[in-house]
Image (cartoon, rainbow, N blue to C red):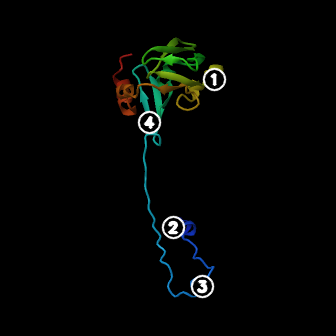
Amino acid sequence: MAKVLAQMAKYTVQKFPRNSKENLFSLSTPKVQLHASRSITTTRCLNAEKLYTEKHEWIRIDGKIGTVGISNYAQESLGDIVYAQLPEIGSMIEKEAECGALESVKAASELFSPVSGKVIDKNELVEKTPNLINTSCYEKGWLFKVEITNPDELKNLMNEDAYNQYLKSDPV
């Protein structure tokens, strides 16, 4: 804290004018006040919480942009993923509508969008190397980014605790 205050003082204390005799020999000196304040701001972006669907897709929100992928449970269920078809950039997608597909050595599975919006990016590396989903489904294996058109749709998604409870009760 002392270093912060010293840095603040260095940049906020004004130099006294020394260009006249009155200023040089004056007995009165201007008062200098140093005000320090501290504020802490928390936003959802700092703790980028993932939200989940019942079909095992996740979305991480950053402002109006959502990054979408599949959960660890889904990638483990699919097995080694060998093909990924992702939505095209610029396409409009609807909540719970099919927007792509994943194929593994065991099965094929459709991708469903957790929200409505416009696709603004897709993970081309995943299309070239689909097994990234198996090795890093929450980081390098994300699938696409969508500009959300209806933020109210997020209210129906599950947080991580609710999703884990759902997995315990899921009969599949």
Residue 84 falls in which quadrant of the image?
top right
- Measured Cα–Cα span from mark 3 to mark 1: 69 Å
Picture disc at residue 49? 4
From the viewer's perspective, tell me whether residue 51 is left or right of residue 130: left
Residue 71 shows up from this direction: no
Residue 54 placement (x, y as % from top left): 39, 21
Question: Which of the two labelled residues, at mark 3 and mark 1, occupies the earlier sequence position?
Answer: 3
Residue 35 falls in which quadrant of the image?
bottom left
Secondary structure beneath dot 1 equals: helix
Image height of 40 relative to 55, above or below: below
Picture disc at residue 24? 3
Q: Residue at x 50, y 85 (%)?
A: 28
Question: Which of the two labelled residues, at mark 2 and mark 1, occupies the earlier sequence position?
Answer: 2
Question: Which of the two labelled residues, at mark 3 and mark 4, occupies the earlier sequence position?
Answer: 3
Which residue is labeled 2 in the image? 5
Secondary structure beneath dot 2 equals: helix
Camera-nearest residue between 13 and 145: 13
Picture disc at residue 124? 1
Residue 117 placement (x, y as % from top left): 47, 22
Secondary structure beneath dot 4 equals: loop
